[in-house]
Amino acid sequence: MTLPNGLPLPEPGPLPKTALVTGGAGALGFEIAKVLSASNEIALLDVGESALNRACELPNATGFGCDVGDSDALHTAYLAAFQKLGPIGIVVHAAGTAPIAPFLDTDRATFEDAINLHLTAGFEIFRLAARDLVLHGKSGRLVAIASISGARAGYARTAYGTAKAGLIHLCGQIALELGPYGITANAVAPGPVDTPLSREAHTAEARADYQRTIPMARYGEAAEVARAVAFLASAESSYISGQTLFVDGGYMASGMGVTVAQSAAAVRRA
Amino acid sequence: MSGRMAGKSVIVYGAGSIGPGWGNGKAAAVLYARQGAYVLCADIDEAAAAETVAIISREGGEADVFVVDTTDQAMVRNATAQALQRRGKVDVVHYNVGISHPGDLEETPMKDWERVFSSNLSGALYAVKAALPSMRERRAGAFVFISSVAAVASSGYRYASYEASKAALNRLAQSLAVEHAADGIRANVVMPGLIDTPHVAHHIAGRVTAAQDFAQRRASTPPMKRQGTARDVAHAALFLASDEAAYITGVTLAVDGGLTLLIPSR
């Protein structure tokens, strides 16, 4: 078709079978890399030795040690990954920490660190990869690991939730501008996931609270989040862009009254 | 049979295409079957359902035709009973029935409004009611409802009954998801955007403008600058229906080339 400026619409190119995962040595990031490694060559980016060590566990992965929140390190690691794999078809930004602090106790450094690692580093790695995809005429799949905290307020999620909300909007922004190139950008927004990070960060009270507010009454597993990422990273999701896919056991669909529904189900079964 | 839906028993309501080519229901039914599922292809039009079944059979899949008017609760019950009889279970209910009547709100005859709600919404609830007992017993089941971005935005057509019924369908799925999560049952929605299907050609194209202008206009609207295909919608449904989405319930996933990014009411 012809665009309003008289130029033809660029024909989306093929989707390269290469994937880069930031935070790829973490519990969630590695699970994502593992699922993607079934049909893609993988670059794992993570701090220090961890990326190299964990890359050895996959047959077709290479680790690139880098602090994802450090701009120079991220550029260097991306260029090294590009040199080895060529244009990166799938970029998953899974690097993250869990800064949990009430609003009144969140200092500026904590806030800025969260924005830097979750949001700014995501912007940077997506932009680096997308520029090369456009240059080489390839399609692409950009997937950001966001969170339910990026869409709904939660206690002590000022830094984390705000950074994740930014990431969700970033995907929409990219989707709008890169749609014509066949590059999609979507967020996967997990609810609480059972990982070492959440085991450490969630108090017993917080865990009980989640059980009460999640209709499925359980935490998600890293593999369940990874499969959603894999779908949005596949050739079959080419018309899905700018979306946030919640992997949350029904949390976003519910509100008050979840315990009532859970009790009712238990009564009916009894 | 292997595949992402191996061993599953699926009912697709609206499994036939209204005209030549691929409608969303037909594409979904064929995709489920390709991935190893048994598919009961339910449709009000026997010949249309038979065409879908013929494709599945030709590919070595398993499917049956079942004639259903989803506004008739007894017929929907019979369809469910038929699937239970054939496979002893219903793993997935895929509701793809949707009709529209054009017209301004003020002039819309109440019988048109009720007909749309009856097909698009009440029929979905009949399908839910019929399948729930056996799903609850097995503590497993997934519903996929095919809605529309019309549920959240005005698309330039005047068909408020369609928009309102699809919005209600979105929430029906979420209510179902919350009420029955504890029973091991999931419910999700696919919201297609501007998709190039025989349904669109049949219901809308003729009365808006010449077909080619119409297609060009639709293609130029979403950020991706093309219309979607029934295959795009079917793949999203397949993902949500499969065990890959075990922790996903109550979501509305737009398959719209970014169309809903352009509207305020996301």
Image (cartoon, rainbow, N blue to C red):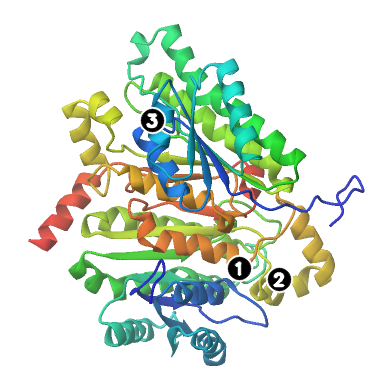
Residue kind at label 3, given as amino acid type: Asn
Q: Is residue B115 visible?
A: no
Label 3: how many Cα within 10 Å (few below 14, some 14–19, many 20+): some
Q: Position of residue B39 (x, y in %)?
A: 42, 80
Label 2: how many Cα within 10 Å (few below 14, some 14–19, many 20+): some
Q: Chain of mark 2?
A: B
Residue kind at label 2, given as amino acid type: Ile
Question: Viewed as shown, does residue B52 lie left or right of A53?
Answer: right
Which numbered dot is residue A262?
none
Helix, strand or loop at label 1? It is helix
The residue tagged 3 is A53
- The correct choice, above or below, for B123 with respect to B187 in the image is below
Question: Relative to the observer, which residue lies in front, B135 or B236?
Answer: B236
Which numbered dot is residue B204?
2
The residue tagged 1 is B230
Q: Is residue B144 visible?
A: yes
